[in-house]
Image (cartoon, helix red, strand yellow):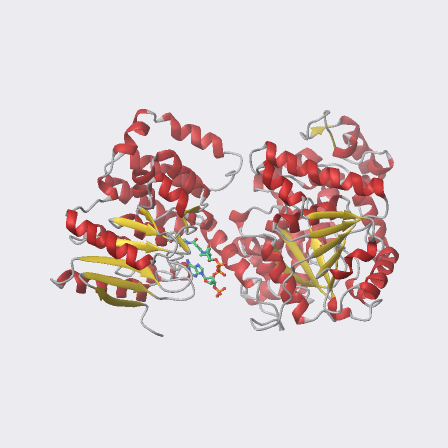
Amino acid sequence: MSDPVRFDRRGAVGVITLDNPPVNALSLPLRTGLRDALAAGLDDPEIEAFVIHSAGRMFSAGADIREFDTGVAGESPTLPELIAQIEDSPKPVVVALHGTAVGGGCELPLACHARVAVPGTRIGLPEVTLGIVPGAGGTQRLPRLIGVLPALEAIVSGKPMDAERAHELGLVDELVMDGQDLVEVAVEVAERLVESGALPKARDRDDLLAEAREQPELFEQFRAKIARRARGFEAPYACIECVEAAVQRPFDEGLAFERETFVRCRSSLQSKAQRHVFFAEREARRVRGVGPDTAKLTIQRAAVLGCGTMGGGIAMCFANAGIPVRVTESEQAALDRGMEKIRGNYAATVAKGRLSAEDMESRLALIEPTLDFDSVSDADIVIEAVFEDMALKKDIFTRLDAICRPDAIMATNTSSLDVDEIAAVTSRPEQVVGLHFFSPANVMRLLEIVRGERTSPEVLSSALDLSRRIGKVGVVVGVCDAFAANRMLYPYAQQAQFLIEEGALPEQIDRVIYEFGFPMGPFGLGDLAGLDVGWRVRQHREPTRPKHLRYSSIADRLYEMGRYGQKTGKGWFRYEEGSRAPIPDPEVEQLIVRTSEELGIERRDISDEEILERCLFALVNEGARVLDEGISERASDLDLIWIYGYGFPRYRGGPMFYADSVGVDHVYATMQRFHEVHGDWLEPAPLLERLAREGGTFADWTPS
Ligand code: T1G
């Protein structure tokens, strides 16, 4: 391992280079090297100032997250010690930023006496996304440099800003112009500081805090403002408390409060869960048979067959990523309706101020509607998003096989049909893959990439690359009925329906699931997706249902009553005109009670705990089967599927991580009890039993 820190001279300026690929994480060896380089320069009378910069594609991604649960993170020199050494240096320290400077990689620059950056550099404090607060002075120095509200926005959202914005706010002192060398500009700034004798320190600034000190209510207002999006999360509120401490306490007291808060958050289950998700997203890119050298097709032109709800949303994903896309339909009216929906979606985003009208027009210009099926022949990828019917899809893939380029990727957006059966009608099944988007496709971040038996590594590599380009979290799964996502959804939704037969009501179950952290419960979700869609899926699944096991008939009865959910104003709940707020409907309760009587079920009071465990443990149990059958390569992939596909609360890490956190033995014992009382739908999966018996966890499980 080469030395992560180098020290050179440019005249009287000591130039320190951080070089710890791939992201210059501030690991212990790097911290030690930096401390020693500074100490050497401080002892050298010929050195009058320092410039710190990094090799590689970015300045730094911050503290080494992998050190968190090892004692190394606390080993000296710790980051706060290093940062104090820099801020208290009697010789000016100038930092030169490029690429990305986040977390500790932003806090270190905040302690420098001047900051120079290349335009476009991403600068920020994303710690809140890891369930922690910035722990090396970020919550104390940033508000002093840019003001309290901009600092609150940056710290509580975790979103980095670019160097231009940072310069506007006074965080970056100098932007490097075209043709200028970053380190050279930083050396000049350092020399100017030496000349002026100035050593500006963020800790000494108070001017931008004064105003906030007069308006203590702004912190309450900020808490109210984030309440909806921060529901259930602990770290955003801990961040606000730290910035509040920056305003109300002397610097060193605020710093101590921040550190205390950081240490508390770092050991919290929420932070462990959110760090699990961070690494799970990176792990998901590692797929059996696909290596970093596997060739991939860079998609420059796409086509989508079908401009319905899914097709239109998928087309928007490509346009949003700047990729031209053709979208087809068989009739003009359907095409016009689809394009109107797309335009409407964009207009809504413009109305919310999250997109400019110009950007809307430029994205719409990338979407080319056409009735000409054959015009997709020059596309790099064609995604079929038509009605969920096997015969129709086979016909389409037969036609695509005849017209598409040999290297083109042919994908199906089916949410449950057999991708191998579809691929088999073509002469090139290796070019066929499932790309299962989640509704609304332009919003939901999950992309379930379905690997067929013959899908080539190159096509998988291209699909994974594409998922990142269109802002999706791509998770590869194998072919089985309903793949991984929906397959785990069914037992979860089914238990919810059995529970209402036994005594609960939809509003109780949805409240429990909502309070657990989901955006909505299974009944609200059913009404959003449409009970007619659910009915069609059940018709499709009926032939595979084990005959000795029944499913609840209440949903079918609602469908037969024409209650399709939000789209008809009535489903499991009733909806006022123009409102999405679910209202319990006595008519539904009567139907439920009547069904219990017909089934001879004596209704009973059901606890919130039983509801939570039956619904969640049922999906965990199915997840164990999905892993055991090799449909998914790792439990953390299933966690991503549920977080990005169904809104499983990120601060609980996903269903499999959650099962590990409550104890696999507890999940197994509870499933055994449920199985005895409620029958075979809740039979514990062999893997769940094995892990419970061996004291294993889903996190440590690997395919045999
Ligand atoms: N620590 C350890 N490993 C890291 C890392 C980090 N901070 N950041 C990235 N990696 C690994 C990552 O797992 C992957 O590994 C490889 O680097 C490339 O990353 C006191 C305590 C910077 C925007 O939250 O957001 O500072 O999979 O694929 O897409 O307040 O990485 O190849 O083995 O993501 O170009 C706060 C986390 C830390 C930023 C680059 N910092 N990183 O994205 O590359 S807490 C963060 C990112 C902190 C202080 C506290 C992104 C990136 P592998 P990548 P990328």
Q: Look at the image and tell me whether residue 132 can be seen.
A: no
Image-based side of 200 in relation to 487, left or right: left
Q: Look at the image and tell me whether residue 77 can be seen.
A: yes
Viewport quadrant of the C terminus: bottom right
Image-based side of 593 in relation to 238, left or right: right
Specify the quarter for ligand 1: bottom left
Residue 148, x across and y down, in percent: 35, 35
327, 553: nearer the viewer: 327
Residue 381, x across and y down, in percent: 71, 60
Image-based side of 238 in relation to 605, left or right: left
Residue 696, x across and y down, in percent: 55, 65
* Picture quadrant of residue 563: top right
- Whether residue 235 is situated above or below residue 8 in the rendered picture: above
- Whether residue 112 is situated above or below residue 36 in the rendered picture: above
- Whether residue 620 is situated above or below residue 290 in the rendered picture: above
- Whether residue 302 is situated above or below residue 125 in the rendered picture: below
Image-based side of 150 in relation to 493, left or right: left
* Picture quadrant of residue 543: bottom right
Report the number of numbered marks. 0
Viewport quadrant of the N terminus: bottom left
* Picture quadrant of residue 292: bottom right
Q: Residue at x 72, y 25 (%)?
A: 576
125, 94: nearer the viewer: 94
Q: Outermost residue, front direction?
A: 179
Q: Residue at x 30, y 41 (%)?
A: 140
13, 3: nearer the viewer: 13
Residue 676, x across and y down, in percent: 71, 54
